[in-house]
Image (tube, grey):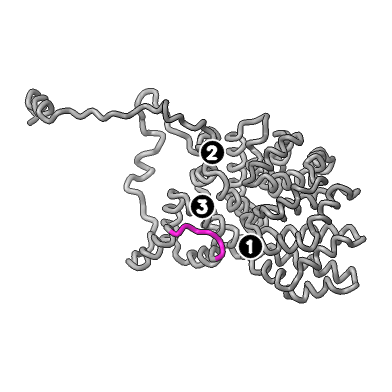
């Protein structure tokens, strides 16, 4: 069934057809961005907003989730037209009313999450919401103490989306009471992979406003959790979500991208381009596109593309409407014009049978860095923004000292080296 037929179900008077239409749109919207354009063209947003007034709780919950998917694509890329359409059809008003007055905690948390999606990256909608005296974070923060873990996770997701690349909203959350590290620890240690990934992303975004732990330490734990899941998980939905989180984080703070690259996120994501599931391929491709703006990641990606050129088509297909480094594209095109052969794995010149890393004896007092350690990740996550701005009056001028040529010649002659 296509988008037009599913939107047509929303026009009927049967609640069963409403349920089919909403669930069908929810499945389609978790894929390519073209579906969001189709929903906008079919005037689907207005019909979805109308479903918020339904008397059936399950329909209201499903509608709220679908509206969130309508607004945000892979990598937290907002769909501006659908966001404006929701605001114009009084969707912000309905969602705000559900967040404050609904007797169901599930509806309150879902409504808060969708509100954050409607205003993400949209200054006009954020201004409308901020001007409303009814919107305050004190209605959202108590849900972090709900007895149901799903409610707590949804609430943290809503706060993270409000705070995503938005310092003013982060300050507003602090003024309303803020969040604590213990809100995320149970989920980071959960046996459910989905919970670990979501909590890792949320804690990284909110790391600067969590007072009882260091931001760099929180970020290192979150990044390690996401990349470990990408390496070990076999569930397609989990892999897609983890790659999506990497895509989101890759266009936040500079230190986060460097930390992701340092633990071979590029190599792990590149392998996912060969997945049999389209959603996994697209999420991995979008994440690689954002990582390619890092110079180290660009070189790593180019090398892997030359090793497996048959996967480049998937990378370029899903990044057509997303960002990818022009420098990477130029270097890949240049290598194609030169008709360079594919890089093949060759045996190392020094075999591991003859020399092991542990057999190399360094100088006394020297220790090799452990690149997978939390300490190394913590240092990688510290971007320039963690340091105080350098005062120009305190900068020391570097002077270069040159040895005169005649003195150098005398020295060499004296020792018989000339």
Examine the rendering and report whether any part of residue 95 can be seen: yes
The image quadrant where one finds the C terminus is top left
**Residue 31, quarter of picture:** bottom right
Report the side of 369 relative to 106 (left or right): left
Q: Which residue is more in the foreground, 128 or 53?
A: 128
The residue shown at (74%, 37%) is 183
Q: Earlier in the sequence, mark 2 or mark 3?
A: 3
Q: Are the residues tagged 2 and 3 within 8 Å (C-beta)?
A: no
Q: Secondary structure at mark 1?
A: helix
Asked whether residue 208 is drawn in magenta, I would say no
- Point out residue 229 in the picture as x, y percentages from the top left corner: 62, 48
Residue placed under numbered mark 1 in the picture? 279
- Point out residue 22 in the picture as x, y percentages from the top left corner: 80, 66
Residue placed under numbered mark 3 in the picture? 291
The residue shown at (69%, 48%) is 161
Q: Is residue 336 above or below residue 359?
A: below
Q: Earlier in the sequence, mark 1 or mark 3?
A: 1
Q: Which SS type dominates the magenta stretch?
A: loop
- Point out residue 130 in the picture as x, y percentages from the top left corner: 74, 47
Residue 381 is marked as 2
Q: Earlier in the sequence, mark 2 or mark 1?
A: 1
* Badge 3: residue crowd in 10 Å (few <14, some 14–19, many ≥20): many
Magenta-tinted stretch: 321-326
Q: Which residue is more in the foreground, 43 or 279?
A: 43
């Amino acid at each position: 069934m296509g988008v037009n037929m599913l939107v047509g179900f929303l026009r009927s008077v049967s609640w069963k057809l409403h349920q089919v239409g909403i669930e069908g749109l929810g499945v389609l919207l978790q894929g390519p961005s073209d579906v969001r354009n189709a929903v906008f063209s079919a005037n689907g947003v207005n019909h979805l907003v109308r479903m918020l007034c339904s008397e059936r709780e399950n329909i209201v919950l499903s509608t709220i989730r679908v509206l969130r998917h309508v607004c945000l694509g892979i990598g937290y890329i907002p769909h501006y037209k659908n966001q404006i359409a929701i605001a114009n059809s009084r969707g912000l008003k309905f969602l705000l009313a559900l967040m404050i007055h609904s007797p169901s905690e599930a509806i309150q948390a879902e409504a808060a999450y969708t509100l954050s999606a409607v205003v993400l990256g949209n200054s006009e909608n954020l201004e409308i919401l901020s001007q409303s005296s009814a919107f305050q974070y004190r209605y959202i923060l108590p849900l972090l103490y709900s007895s149901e873990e799903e409610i707590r996770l949804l609430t943290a997701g809503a706060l993270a989306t409000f705070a995503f690349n938005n310092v003013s909203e982060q300050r507003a959350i602090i003024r309303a009471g803020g969040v604590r590290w213990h809100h995320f620890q149970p989920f980071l240690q959960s046996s459910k992979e989905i919970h670990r990934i979501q909590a890792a992303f949320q804690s990284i975004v909110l790391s600067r406003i969590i007072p009882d732990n260091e931001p760099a330490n929180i970020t290192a734990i979150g990044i390690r959790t996401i990349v470990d899941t990408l390496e070990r998980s076999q569930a397609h939905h989990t892999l897609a979500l983890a790659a999506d989180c990497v895509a989101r984080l890759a266009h936040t703070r500079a230190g986060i991208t460097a930390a992701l690259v340092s633990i071979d996120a590029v190599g792990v994501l590149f392998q996912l381009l060969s997945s049999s599931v389209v959603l996994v391929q697209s999420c991995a491709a979008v994440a690689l596109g954002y990582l390619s703006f890092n110079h180290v990641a660009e070189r790593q990606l180019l090398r892997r593309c030359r090793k497996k050129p048959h996967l480049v088509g998937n990378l370029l297909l899903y990044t057509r409407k997303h960002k990818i480094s022009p420098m990477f594209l130029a270097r890949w095109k240049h290598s194609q014009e030169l008709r360079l052969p594919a890089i093949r794995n060759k045996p190392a010149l020094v075999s591991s049978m003859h020399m092991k890393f542990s057999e190399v004896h360094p100088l006394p007092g020297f220790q090799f860095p452990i690149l997978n350690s939390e300490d190394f990740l913590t240092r990688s996550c510290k971007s320039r923004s963690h340091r105080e701005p350098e005062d120009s009056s305190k900068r020391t001028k570097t002077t270069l000292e040159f040895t005169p040529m005649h003195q150098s010649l005398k020295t060499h002659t004296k020792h018989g080296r000339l």
